[in-house]
Structure formats: structure tokens, C-alpha cells
Image (cartoon, rainbow, N blue to C red):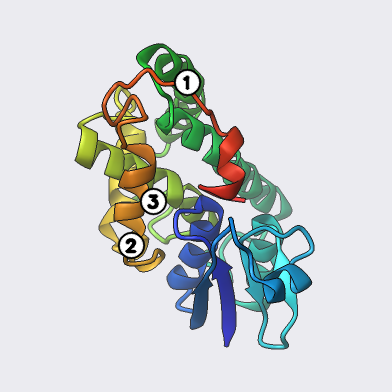
Amino acid sequence: MLKVVSYVICPFVQRITGLLEAKEIPYDIEYISLKDKPKWFLDIAPNAQVPLLITEDNIPLSESDAIAEYLDDEYPLLRPEINKSACRARQRAWVYQGTKLYLKQCSHMQSSNQQIFEERQEFMRKQFAKVENFLNGHTKTQYFCSDIIGNIDMAWLPLFHRAALVQKYSGTKLFEGFPLLQIWADNIMATGIAEKTVHDSFEESFVNFYLSDKTYLGSGNTAQDSGCGGLSSSCCD
């Protein structure tokens, strides 16, 4: 059975567990502390980062893009109708658009005051506008251009899950002004996959990290901002 090595609130790991859940591939998962990485993990992880996937042949794989590619090579594609190179390239491009926002979203949510939050929000809104514009021409499908969940949907799942928690606990709508993006996010969240991809303590850990009295979303505290610089040992690695 496949094994995933994870940290509780890492979005890069959730992308991989999302793919595994959507493809209904059985797997085990082990959570580690990034501040106290076990020796066995350091011995097999070339970059000492999560996610790490250990294959059924006991081969360790790192980097979420490489792991996602491996899963597509070894297991049926989520949307097998995408068999033309141009379509695959476009799919990879939208996957990249999502994954490159993981750390940006982490930084955004961790902003310590309103000014920093709004500055980072402006960057995020520019990225969301690109998605909204694309979806405007593809409004008849439940997910991203399809009624079948695909790699793009799972790449954006961590962003949607975190935005939903921010709205739940702070009332802030990170996708405000982007109705089609919000519909897409709601449809993905309605599948229940998000909850299956994380540890039982994920929500509590997320709230304690991003919605504490040290963040703008948590209380508007104006303490010195740490950005995402400190996240390599906290949020993700």
C-alpha cells in the first residue's frame, strides 16, 4: 500500500491526499513534526520536505508535482478523455496556477495587520480574476470544465478548503467578487473530499495557526509580521 508522510496543515500534502481520495487509491499516512524530523524521514527524503510518498515498491518520492505525475502514470487518469497533448498542457498550466498560490495564500492569511492583508489580497485577487474570466466561458459544468473531478480540481482543493475555514471562523470571504470561482469552490467542498484528506486535528491546528491573536484575520493584532518566511517549519516545507 502507498504511504504518505505528512504535516498536519501542509497544503502540498493535501493536494496529494486529494488525488488519492478522488482516485479511490488506498494509502496509509504518517504525520511528523517538521521542527523535529525523525531520522528515518531524513534518511529517505532528499529535500527533507513533505509530502513524501513511499510507493508499494518502497521507493520514496518527493515534490508534489513529481508525486502527482507518478500517480497519473501508475493509476488511471481522473479524466481519461483528456488525451491530447494540448489538453494535457493546458491542464498542467491550471494545476500550476493553483499550486503556486499555496504559499501566497499562507502568507495572506498570516498577515498581521489590515494594510499587509490588503496588499497581499490585491495579488490574490489578480490571480482569481484570471480563473473567473476562464470560468465565465465554461459555466455549464460542475467542476473545472467537466462534471468529473480532475487534477485541476484537486490542485485547487487546498485553497478552497482554507478559504472555507477562514469564512467559517472570521466571516472574511477570500473569494468575494468572484462568484464563479466561489461556485467551483463550493462544488468541490460539497464532495466531502476535503475532510477525508486531512488529520482530525486539521481544523483546530489551522485556526490556532492562522486565526490566532497574532493575525489580522484572528484579531487585527498589529504585531510584527512574519510573512511566510517562518512557514518552512510550521505550515509547510
Residue that carries the numbered disc 2 in the rendered image:
201
Q: Nearer the viewer, mark 3 or mark 1?
A: 1
**Frontmost residue, 33 versus 18:** 33
Label 2 and label 1: CA atoms lie apart by: 27 Å
Q: Amino acid at mark 1?
A: Gln
Q: Nearer the viewer, mark 2 or mark 1?
A: 1
Dot 2, crowdedness within 10 Å: few (<14), some or many (≥20)?
A: few
Label 3 and label 2: CA atoms lie apart by: 28 Å
Q: Residue at position x 41%, y 65% from top?
A: 197
Q: Amino acid at mark 3?
A: Tyr
Provide residue 196's location: percent of width, then percent of height: 35, 68
**Frontmost residue, 183 versus 34:** 34
Q: Is residue 31 left or right of residue 138?
A: right
Q: Are marks 3 and 1 in contact (CB under 8 Å)?
A: no
Residue that carries the numbered disc 1 in the rendered image:
224
Residue that carries the numbered disc 3 in the rendered image:
143
